[in-house]
Image: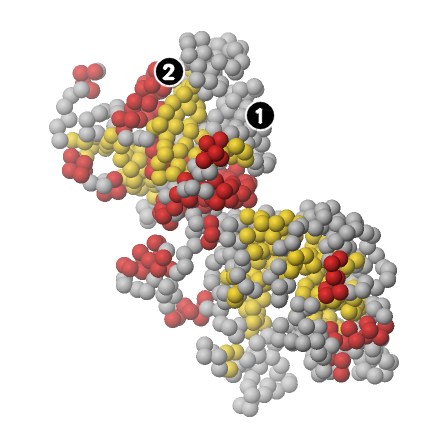
Amino acid sequence: MEALLNLPQGDSVFAEYVWIDGYGKLRSKGRTLTRAILTKAPTELPKWNYDGSSTSQAPGSDSEVILRPQAVFKDPFRAGDNLLVMCDTYTPAGEPLPTNSRYSCAKVQEAAKEHEPWFGLEQEYFLTNLKTGRPLGFPDDGSEPEAQKWYYCGVGAKYIFGRQIVEAHWRACIYAGISISGINGEVACGQWEFQVGPVTGVAQGDQMWMARYILERIAETAGVGVDYSAKPVKGDWNGSGCHSNFSTAAMRAPGGYENAIIPALERLALKHELHIKNYGDNTERLTGKHETASMEKFTWGAADRGASCRVGHDTVKEGCGYLEDRRPSGDVDSTASTDSDDAVDVSDVLSSGVEALALFPSNADDPVLAAGAAADGADPDAVYDEEELSDVLLRPTDALVIAAVAEEDASLLAFHVVEPAVSYGDDGAALADTDEEEGRDDGAGERPPEVPYTPHAYVHHDLILPAFPLATAWTDGRVGGVDAGGSYVAVGSFGPAIDVFDVNAMDSLEAVREYLASGSADSTVKVWDAETGVAATTLGHHADKVQAVAWSPVDDAALLTASFDGRLAVVDVRAPPPPTGGGAGGVRLSADVEAAAWLVGGAAAGGGVPPVGTAVAVTTEDGVLALHDVRRLGGAACGGGGRKKKGKGRAAATLLGSVVAHAGAATAMAQSSALPGLLVTGGTDKYVRVWDVAALAAAAAADGGRPGPPPPSPASPRTAALWERNAEPGDSESDGEDEVRGGMRLDSSDTGSGVEGEEDDGMDGRD
């Protein structure tokens, strides 16, 4: 047999095509090529195909899968000019298979190459007895060998098993051109490790997969098995990981520990659950024992092998270096584990739940879109032609309603466009509506009352959210106090991240303000640096769940917070944090907070509307709408006191006005940016009501701050009336319901009749 294997092969080159199957295992088959291929790039080698129905990658009725060569190595088994060819997998139509993680990894690494990411992987594995299925060194009778103590980097036949296989693998990898940097015996009996790297980009995955292939081929010859699984031996034995060492140019530069490594670790913590899902089955390995951290919680530390991520003492001492992610299992897909957004410029990414997201200032900077556009000489930013613009364009005149929707199989952010009675062209000119079903124009710009126009809405587009949504908020698009333009919405969810979307760009995710604020069920308020995605300040001045936070419209450092502890406070985030555990003084409220916001005020304190940035509105579970002047908080905003009991009592010194707005909880509140002083509330009584801030404040001055009575139920679900806070019986045309003060009751039925109302002096004719 040996003589036959050594026969000359002439001008032929034997190429072993290697790929990953549908089970995450390696497969290969050989092909005869000519020496002409030796001067070609790996991707210029001929494509090939195989039966995907036999590898769990295609149905039998359409089983062909295409192999595309991506990396070439010298063949240590056949030697000479023969090759090992690492391939990835595609459909005949050219689409990457779902199991082809290399495809997405290559795109991410290409986008991040300017950051010079380095990877080094530590592959742990067991050599196993094929007859017993147990690691080498374990007795055949089912008993256990001596406990873990002497096997790690051990010496001697009593503790070391399979060294010849390991040595042969080391040399074979060096011959093949793999950057194998070392080997050692591991902690458990029959367990070994080899390291590959440092290597840049997707080449790390190619080299690791080929190193595994070579090891399995050598073990095949020796009649020994290789087990990469996370916990092949139950009990008090170490499992196997594939620890990932990582750095960027910024991490390796002076000051990299503080400026890049620590922020990267904090970002990794935000995506811990997502990473665990992609790091193999670690249920029995990541338990907090045997040099692992629990998979339930992210931790990091210097030289801590019991942490999720470890930083070496040298890195801390020298102030630069690398980090080690110890979470990936031994059988992890190495191209998936290196497909990391830590290699992407995170100044353009706010932790989003979207793995490895790279953002570009324009389509011209996106290598994928730019390449497609260059093929036909098109402007890369001209993604849509004129006919498609009407389907994707959001015009400044569009009335936009954004809703976070939790459906059975997904959570969405839906962008609704409300079509008004008058539409507008691209030049802003009004266009007459000629839709016969929705109303006619009689030529004079009037619609006959017998054919009323009914506005309707449609979903322009939607985005998939990474977690169940809890809250949405418009952000002002300011960066450094300067208006950056655009319209932005932030979404808070059950996940730890805040997603910020640019409404003017479809499928866009972007951090738009230097700092974001979030309130949590853990009673804390966090102020986030949007550039790094790291919490800059954590405030613990509330004693219960935080329901609302809002930045001042005039002071970038003033933050309004409101909590289920029955308190509302305004905090200066530049000052030292206030006392924790309910130390905020602030304003005592009558019940749990439902919504809170800064009032959209007037330019000056005229007309009864407070100046912008001086007052807030808050709604509570008992249905009360209250207005407070935060200037009267003085130094007590976050000073002194522990938790105080919420409930009725003497009116706060800050109170400008209040009313029992709803018969149940007042769960929602909104304001008109065009009409300062116009405020809308919604409640569990299924009504929406409109309020005049000036009227409420004037009535409170007359009544000493006592909340007004709740509005009664309407006589008809199709009617809505406007009342003044201090109306006397018979003064309004409210059909006997004149005891209702300061609000408008709107139609809550689905009759399509719209809103009907009557003018009242308390609203200056606004309805």
Quarter assignment of residue 244: top left
Q: How far across and how far down the image is residue 54, in percent? A: 37, 34
Residue named by callout 1: 289
Residue named by callout 2: 163
Q: How far across and how far down the image is residue 758, in percent? A: 74, 81
The furthest residue to the left: 10
- Marked residue nearer the N-terminal end (1 or 2): 2
The residue that appears at 36% across and 48% down in the rendered structure is: 114
Q: How far across and how far down the image is residue 515, in percent? A: 56, 56
Q: 648 or 16, which is in the foreground?
A: 648
* Count of marks overlaid on the render: 2
Kindly indicate whether the residue at mark 2 contacts the one at mark 1 (C-beta within 8 angstroms).
Answer: no
Q: 32 or 206, which is in the foreground?
A: 206
Is 10 situated left or right of 23 in this image?
A: left
The residue that appears at 33% across and 19% down in the rendered structure is: 167
Q: Up-down: is 522 above or below 221?
A: below
